[in-house]
Image (cartoon, rainbow, N blue to C red):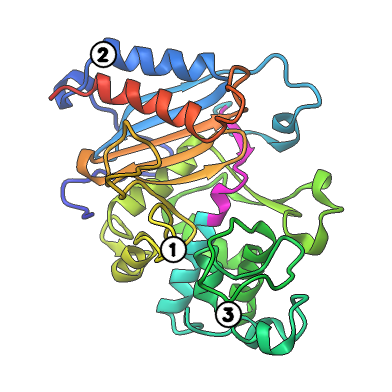
């Protein structure tokens, strides 16, 4: 990933590009948009080299009482939805952890209890002292969802939101600062993500230990800015936001899951890609309801999608249905 020839938007303005001039079939991109619309998307953005390749927004008419309605946090000044991006926030927190490490505030080899104190899990003291930040970043803490000790850290990959959530606290403790403030000063203000913030989730108030009590809310454009920074190797224009070597480490597969780095999904396993139709260098953030941020360096491409879970998702295919359907159409629209 590098920032050569990348365009970075100024303020709210965003320069566009004619699809046919950069190797895209217009009718093929129309099919991508139709797929997005038919599958309950509310916002969809594609950037080519940082420039706006296509962008569209839709309103859902039948969202009363839905999880989507609970995650809708209003609209920006242009009427674009601001939504809770669910577990996309995990990847955002991983970037914050990289910044904290670059600043010397923490190390990924640190033991979590050095920041959280003894007793943050239901494990014994000896077991708890084995859990390091890198184990939490790679979803290999060895804990179950009740924070009971199951296996030694690093031996089992298990998607554990409860354990992950402690990282947000740890970053604030390490920096001796409100992590909401750190979010603004370290990332969102620097990238121009004006409508991105952490918001309370009233529906999650009874979830243990506040693991899901707040959510990152943003727009499809806000996510696109984040993806553009990742595409640029951690830079925004000529300024480093995330150290390039630490970003590369975060986007490297962990030992026990070839499709996962530090809270980022990776398509790098040639034999078992997480999205078979997509290029192998794709990296991504996923959130419930099919919230998406995809970054593909080989295509200089960033894609974001907001919205709700598609009605037609086949049983047992929550993860693959939208990913595969979208990327088969994107690749069909790409001229060789």
Q: CA distance from mark 3 to mark 2?
A: 48 Å
The residue tagged with tag 1: helix, strand or loop?
loop
Look at the numbered discs 2 and 1 and tell me whether their residues touch, using CB distance below 8 Å: no
133, 192: nearer the viewer? 133
Report if residue 9 is visible in the image: no
Q: Position of residue 32 (x, y in %)?
A: 38, 18
* Mark positioned earlier in the residue sequence (1 or 3): 3
Q: Position of residue 210 (x, y in %)?
A: 77, 61
Give the magenta range. 80-90
Q: Position of residue 125 (x, y in %)?
A: 72, 88
* Mark positioned earlier in the residue sequence (3 or 2): 2
244, 76: nearer the viewer? 244
Q: Vertical placement of 212 versus 311: above or below?
A: below
Left or right of 21 in this view: 308: right
Q: CA distance from mark 2 to mark 1?
A: 41 Å
Q: Nearer the viewer, mark 3 or mark 2?
A: 2
Report if residue 69 is visible in the image: yes
* Mark positioned earlier in the residue sequence (2 or 1): 2
Which residue does the numbered mark 3 point to in the structure image? 175
**The disc label shown at residue 26, or none:** 2
Q: CA distance from mark 1 to mark 3?
A: 30 Å
Q: Nearer the viewer, mark 2 or mark 1?
A: 1
Which residue does the numbered mark 1 point to in the structure image? 256
**The disc label shown at residue 318, or none:** none
């Amino acid at each position: 990933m590098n920032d050569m020839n990348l365009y970075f938007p100024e303020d709210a303005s965003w320069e566009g590009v004619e699809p046919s001039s950069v190797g895209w079939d217009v009718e093929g991109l129309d099919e991508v948009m139709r797929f997005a619309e038919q599958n309950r998307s509310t916002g969809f953005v594609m950037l080519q080299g940082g420039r706006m390749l296509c962008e569209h927004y839709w309103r859902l008419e039948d969202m009363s009482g839905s999880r989507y309605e609970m995650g809708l946090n209003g609209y920006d000044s242009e009427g674009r939805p601001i939504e809770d991006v669910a577990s996309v926030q995990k990847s955002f927190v991983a970037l914050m952890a990289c910044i904290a490490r670059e600043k010397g505030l923490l190390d990924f080899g640190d033991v979590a209890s050095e920041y959280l104190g003894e007793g943050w899990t239901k494990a014994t003291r000896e077991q708890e002292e084995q859990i390091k930040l890198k184990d939490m970043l790679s979803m290999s803490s060895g804990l179950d969802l009740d924070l009971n000790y199951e296996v030694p850290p690093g031996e089992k990959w298990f998607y554990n939101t409860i354990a992950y959530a402690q990282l947000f606290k740890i970053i604030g403790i390490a920096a001796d600062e409100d992590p909401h403030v750190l979010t603004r000063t370290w990332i969102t203000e620097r990238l121009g993500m004006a409508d991105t913030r952490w918001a309370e989730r009233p529906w999650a108030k009874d979830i243990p230990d506040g693991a899901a009590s707040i959510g990152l809310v943003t727009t499809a454009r806000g996510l696109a800015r984040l993806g553009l920074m990742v595409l640029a190797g951690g830079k925004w224009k000529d300024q480093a936001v995330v150290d390039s070597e630490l970003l590369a480490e975060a986007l490297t597969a962990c030992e026990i899951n070839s499709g996962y780095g530090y809270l980022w999904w990776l398509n790098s396993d040639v034999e078992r890609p997480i999205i078979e139709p997509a290029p192998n260098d794709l990296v991504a953030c996923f959130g419930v309801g099919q919230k998406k941020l995809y970054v593909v360096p080989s295509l200089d491409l960033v894609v974001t999608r907001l919205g709700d879970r598609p009605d037609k998702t086949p049983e047992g295919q929550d993860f693959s249905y939208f990913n595969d359907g979208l990327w088969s159409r994107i690749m069909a629209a790409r001229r060789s």
